[in-house]
C-alpha cells in the first residue's frame, strides 16, 4: 500500500505538470522497488485514474483543510492520493493515514509528517461536511472543467447531470467475441470455467462483472476475443458489409474496428490507414492476433494523392480523431488536458477528413462517420454541415432505440459515441 501511495504520488506529480496519465503511470511502474504484483498494478491504476475522476472534488475538500496556501509538489499530490483513498475506496482509513505519513518522510519533505497526519485526520473527522461544501458547485460535484460542464448542460438540458455523472464511474470491461472462432454463448461458458462472470451486450459483446487482466481471457492470443466497448461494436453493422466489397478504414489505429470488420465481413478487400506509423504497427499486430488480413498504410487520410490509387471504395469508415468527451471515464485525464478551444480545431480537422474521404466513396456506396464524443460540434453539427456541402449525400437514419440522433449516451454499459451514415447518390 505504501508503495502504491509513493508511486501514485510520483505519477500524479507528473500529471499535474501536464503529462498524459498513462505515460505517467508507466514511468511510475518503472520506479517501483522490485516487481509489482498484479494486485499492486491494478491498485496503482485505480488510484491514478480515480484521482483524475474526482480531481476537483478532492481539491475543494483539501482546500478547506489548508490553513494557508496549498502545499508545494510533491506533497500536494500525496494528499490528493490519500484523500481519494479515504473518500472513494475501501482501504482501511488508519492504513491510508499512517502510510501517507511514511511516504511524506520518504519524499524527504521537512516537517511534512505532522502536517500530513493532521490534514488527513481532520478530513476523516468532518468528511461529510467538507464534501457538502465541495459539492456546492457543479465543478466540485462532477469534477469537470467549467467550460465542459456548460457545454454539456447547454447541449443536453434534460440529461447533463447523468452524462457528467457517468464520467465519474469506473468503466466496465467489455469483450467482443470473435464469432468466427466461437459463439458468444460458447465463449461465455469458457469464461465461466475460469470463474469470470459476464453478461451479454449488443450483438457479440460481453460485459465482465469485474475487469481482469487480458492474460486471463481464454483464447485471447488466438484471437477468440478482443476488448472493445459496446458502443464501438456498431461499426460493421452500420457499414452493412457484403462479400467482396472494397473497404477503407481511414483512421484505423489501434485496429479495434478494423479487426471487427474483418471478423464479420466475408472476402473483403480492406485498406487500413493511420497517419501515425507507430500506431499502424499496432493495427498489424492486432490483425495478426485475429488471423485476418488487410493492407495497412501509414498516411494522412485527408491527403488523397499520398495514398489513393483512384479506385473507389464501397464502404468507408471514418472513426475520426475527436475530443474523446464520450470516453472521459476511460481516460479521465482528458478532462484536464483538453481546452475549450480544441473543439473548433478538432471539428475543422474532422470536416477536412470527411470532405476528402467522400471523394473516394463509389456511387451507391456509404461512408460511416464515427466519434467517441458527446459534443454536438463534432457530431450532429458536423453531420448537418456535411449534408449542406454535399447535396448528393443521402443521410441514412439509424433506427435503434440506443441511438438519439446518432448519439449513444454514455451509460453503465456504453461509452458515449456518435455515428452518422451517408450514402452517395
Ligand atoms: C479514434 S482513433 C481510431 C480508433 C480505431 N478506429 C479503433 O477502432 O481502434 C483516431 C485515429 O485517427 C488517427 N488520425 C488522426 N488524424 C489522421 C489523419 N489525418 N489521417 C489518418 N489517421 C489519422 C490517429 O492517429 C488515431 O489513431
Image: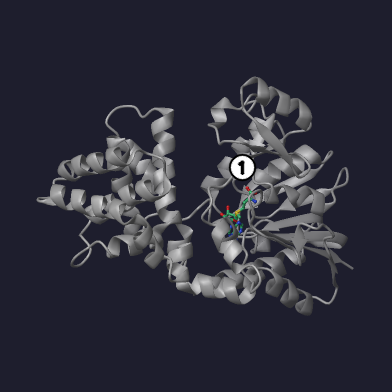
Seen at 85% across and 51% down, the residue is 240
**Left or right: 11 with respect to 278?**
left
As rendered, which of 192 and 239 lies closer to the eye? 192
Q: Which image quarter: residue 399? A: bottom right
Observer-nearest of 92 and 100: 92
Residue that lies at the very extreme toward the bottom in this rendered image: 388
Whether label 1 lies within 8 Å of ligand 1 gets the answer: yes
Identify the colour scheme used.
Answer: one colour
Q: Residues within 10 Å of mark 1 (few under 14, many from 20)?
A: many
The number of discs equals: 1
The answer to whether residue 157 is above or below residue 100 is below
Q: Quadrant of the C terminus?
A: bottom right
Task: Specify the quadrant that holds the N terminus.
Answer: top left
**In this orientation, which residue lies closer to the viewer: 95 or 378?**
95
- Residue found at the far top of this picture: 193
- Residue 374 shows in this picture: yes
**Residue 129, how many percent across, how many down?**
35, 62
Q: Position of residue 71 (x, y in %)?
A: 20, 60
Dividing the picture into quadrants, the one containing residue 388 is bottom right
- Disc 1 target residue: 283
Residue 151 in percent (x, y) is at 56, 74
Q: Do we see residue 309 in this rendering?
A: no
- What percent of the width, then of the height, locates residue 126? 31, 57
Name the secondary structure under disc 1: helix
| Residue at x 33%, y 58% (from the top left corner) | 16
Amino acid at each position: 500500500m505504501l508503495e502504491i501511495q509513493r508511486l501514485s504520488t510520483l505519477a500524479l506529480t507528473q500529471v499535474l505538470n501536464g503529462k498524459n496519465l498513462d505515460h505517467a503511470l508507466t514511468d511510475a511502474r518503472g520506479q517501483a522497488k522490485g516487481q509489482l504484483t498484479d494486485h499492486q498494478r491494478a491498485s496503482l491504476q485505480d488510484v491514478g485514474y480515480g484521482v483524475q475522476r474526482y480531481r476537483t472534488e478532492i481539491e475543494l475538500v483539501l482546500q478547506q483543510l489548508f490553513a494557508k496556501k496549498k502545499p508545494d509538489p510533491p506533497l500536494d499530490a500525496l494528499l490528493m492520493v490519500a484523500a481519494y483513498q479515504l473518500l472513494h475506496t475501501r482501504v482501511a482509513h488508519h492504513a491510508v493515514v499512517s502510510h501517507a505519513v511514511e511516504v511524506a518522510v520518504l519524499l524527504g519533505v521537512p516537517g511534512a509528517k505532522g502536517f500530513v497526519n493532521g490534514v488527513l485526520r481532520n478530513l476523516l473527522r468532518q468528511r461529510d461536511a467538507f464534501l457538502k461544501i465541495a459539492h456546492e458547485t457543479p465543478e466540485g460535484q462532477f469534477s469537470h472543467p467549467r467550460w465542459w460542464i456548460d457545454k454539456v448542460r447547454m447541449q443536453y438540458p434534460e440529461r447533463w447531470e447523468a452524462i457528467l455523472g457517468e464520467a465519474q464511474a469506473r468503466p466496465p470491461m467489455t469483450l467482443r467475441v470473435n464469432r468466427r472462432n466461437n459463439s458468444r454463448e460458447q465463449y461465455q461458458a469458457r469464461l465461466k470455467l475460469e470463474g469470470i462472470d459476464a453478461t451479454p451486450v449488443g450483438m457479440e459483446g460481453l460485459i465482465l462483472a469485474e475487469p481482469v487482466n487480458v492474460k486471463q481471457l481464454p483464447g485471447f492470443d488466438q484471437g477468440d476475443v478482443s476488448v472493445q466497448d459496446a458502443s464501438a461494436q456498431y461499426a460493421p453493422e452500420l457499414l452493412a458489409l457484403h462479400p467482396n466489397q472494397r473497404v477503407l478504414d481511414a483512421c484505423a489505429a489501434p485496429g479495434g474496428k478494423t479487426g471487427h470488420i474483418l471478423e464479420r465481413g466475408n472476402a473483403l478487400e480492406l485498406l487500413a490507414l493511420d497517419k501515425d506509423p507507430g500506431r499502424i504497427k499496432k493495427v498489424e499486430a492486432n490483425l495478426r492476433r485475429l488471423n485476418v488480413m488487410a493492407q495497412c498504410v501509414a498516411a494522412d487520410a485527408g491527403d488523397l494523392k499520398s495514398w489513393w490509387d483512384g479506385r473507389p471504395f464501397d464502404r468507408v469508415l471514418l472513426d475520426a480523431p475527436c475530443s474523446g468527451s464520450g470516453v472521459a471515464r476511460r481516460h479521465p485525464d482528458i478532462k484536464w488536458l483538453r481546452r475549450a478551444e480544441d473543439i473548433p480545431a478538432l471539428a475543422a480537422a474532422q470536416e477536412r477528413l470527411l470532405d476528402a474521404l467522400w471523394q473516394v466513396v463509389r456511387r451507391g456506396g456509404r461512408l460511416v462517420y464515427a466519434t467517441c464524443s458527446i459534443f454536438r460540434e463534432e457530431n450532429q453539427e458536423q453531420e448537418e454541415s456535411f449534408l449542406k456541402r454535399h447535396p448528393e449525400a443521402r443521410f441514412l437514419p439509424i433506427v435503434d432505440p440506443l441511438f438519439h440522433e446518432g448519439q449513444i449516451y454514455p451509460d453503465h454499459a456504453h461509452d458515449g459515441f456518435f455515428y452518422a451514415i451517408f450514402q452517395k447518390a
